[in-house]
Image: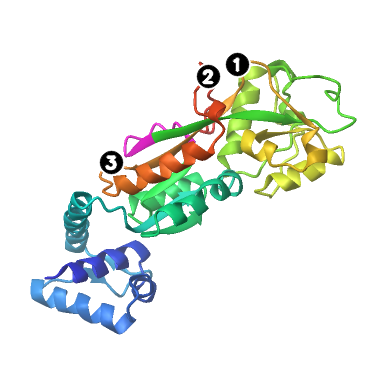
């Protein structure tokens, strides 16, 4: 029995397809299949039921796969211990980031990490919250950057910054002349929303329900779009106002930036964290990423305002 064989077994369980597993392990399918067959013969059992589509682990196979994951994690600890003793921060690191953060945060920290830590090989995916949690659970990601708190006891949350919500109020809107927007003026039916699945949509809905409980979603503009650019363009055409996270607002071109208004205190914000499994071994890389991000974020976003965090969980 070898670690390579265990790695291949775990890959097949993760992707439930021999060819896909082989592709992610950077080997040919015959090579992967041969090694798994060899292990099955050695143990005198079947780990996978190949008659099922997608392929399924057998009853004993599930127990072996669970133990294989533990064994692989333990073997990684040895590598991390050696790196730590030498002061090395290196290796592949798989990071997931939600779409409402990626375009505004990634350009702020990626270049510095690549320049200062060339031995870190980052693999970054843009994923929604549920996808990040699922991939963390399957060891397909090392960490994720998203809105918290999630109240999930499987993960560790390390807050990075606290991002206020900003109101985008176009010309001709009922709030155009206001210097700032009151909580009670946030009517859900007047706010353009992202599509289902985006936690920022849930942030906005929860904020509006909290600020104005009698408000309803009836008549709200719902879009099959995951980006703020579309919301802003429709807002400029008179379809309503919208809310933006702070980093998205300050990145707007000059004409649109004039339509940004703050929301009254306590200013609603979202907590942005880097999360990882409790058994995560690559803490040194996580610390590097967190440190660089905090250095590139406006200082006023690094402190939490009392009672201002809006839940990212759907209400």
The part of the image, by quadrant, that contains residue 266 is top right
The numbered dot on residue 278 is 3
N-terminal of the two: label 2 or label 3?
A: 3
- Which one is nearer the viewer's eye here, 60 or 192? 192
Kindly tell me whether residue 213 is visible in this rendering. no
The residue under the point 65% across, 18% down is 211
The part of the image, by quadrant, that contains residue 253 is top right
Q: Are marks 3 and 1 in contact (CB under 8 Å)?
A: no
- Dot 1 lies on which element? loop
Q: Pointer 1: what residue?
A: 266
Residue 265 vertical placement versus 290 (above, below): above
Mark 2: give few (<14), some (14-19) or many (20+) Cα within 10 Å: some
Residue 102 vertical placement versus 235 (above, below): below
Q: Pointer 2: what residue?
A: 305
N-terminal of the two: label 1 or label 2?
A: 1
Quadrant in the picture for the N terminus = bottom left
The segment highlighted magenta reads 147-157
């Amino acid at each position: 029995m070898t670690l390579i064989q265990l790695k291949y077994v775990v890959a097949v369980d993760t992707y439930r397809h021999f060819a896909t597993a082989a592709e992610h392990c950077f080997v040919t399918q015959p090579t992967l299949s041969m090694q798994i067959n060899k292990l099955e013969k050695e143990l005198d059992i079947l780990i996978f039921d190949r008659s099922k589509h997608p392929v399924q682990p057998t009853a004993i196979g599930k127990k072996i796969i669970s133990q294989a994951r533990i064994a692989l994690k333990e073997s990684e600890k040895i590598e991390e211990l050696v790196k730590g003793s030498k002061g090395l921060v290196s290796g592949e690191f798989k990071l997931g980031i939600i779409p409402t953060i990626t375009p505004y945060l990634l350009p702020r920290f990626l270049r510095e990490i690549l320049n200062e830590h060339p031995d870190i090989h980052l693999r970054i995916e843009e994923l929604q919250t549920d996808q990040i949690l699922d991939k963390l659970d399957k060891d397909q990601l090392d960490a994720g950057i998203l809105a918290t708190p999630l109240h999930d006891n499987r993960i560790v949350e390390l807050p990075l910054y606290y991002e206020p919500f900003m109101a985008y109020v176009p010309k001709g809107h009922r709030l155009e002349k206001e210097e700032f927007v009151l909580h009670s003026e946030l009517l859900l039916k007047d706010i353009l929303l992202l599509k289902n699945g985006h936690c920022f949509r849930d942030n906005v809905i929860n904020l509006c329900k909290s600020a104005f409980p009698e408000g309803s979603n009836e008549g709200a503009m719902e879009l099959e779009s995951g980006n703020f650019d579309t919301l802003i363009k429709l807002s400029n055409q008179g379809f309503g106002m919208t809310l933006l996270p702070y980093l998205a607002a300050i990145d707007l071109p000059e004409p649109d930036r004039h339509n940004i208004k703050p929301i009254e205190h306590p200013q609603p914000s979202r907590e942005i964290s880097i999360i990882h499994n409790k058994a995560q071994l690559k803490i040194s890389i996580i610390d590097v990423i967190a440190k660089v991000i905090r250095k590139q974020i406006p200082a006023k976003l690094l402190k939490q305002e009392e009672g201002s965090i809006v839940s990212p969980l759907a209400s």
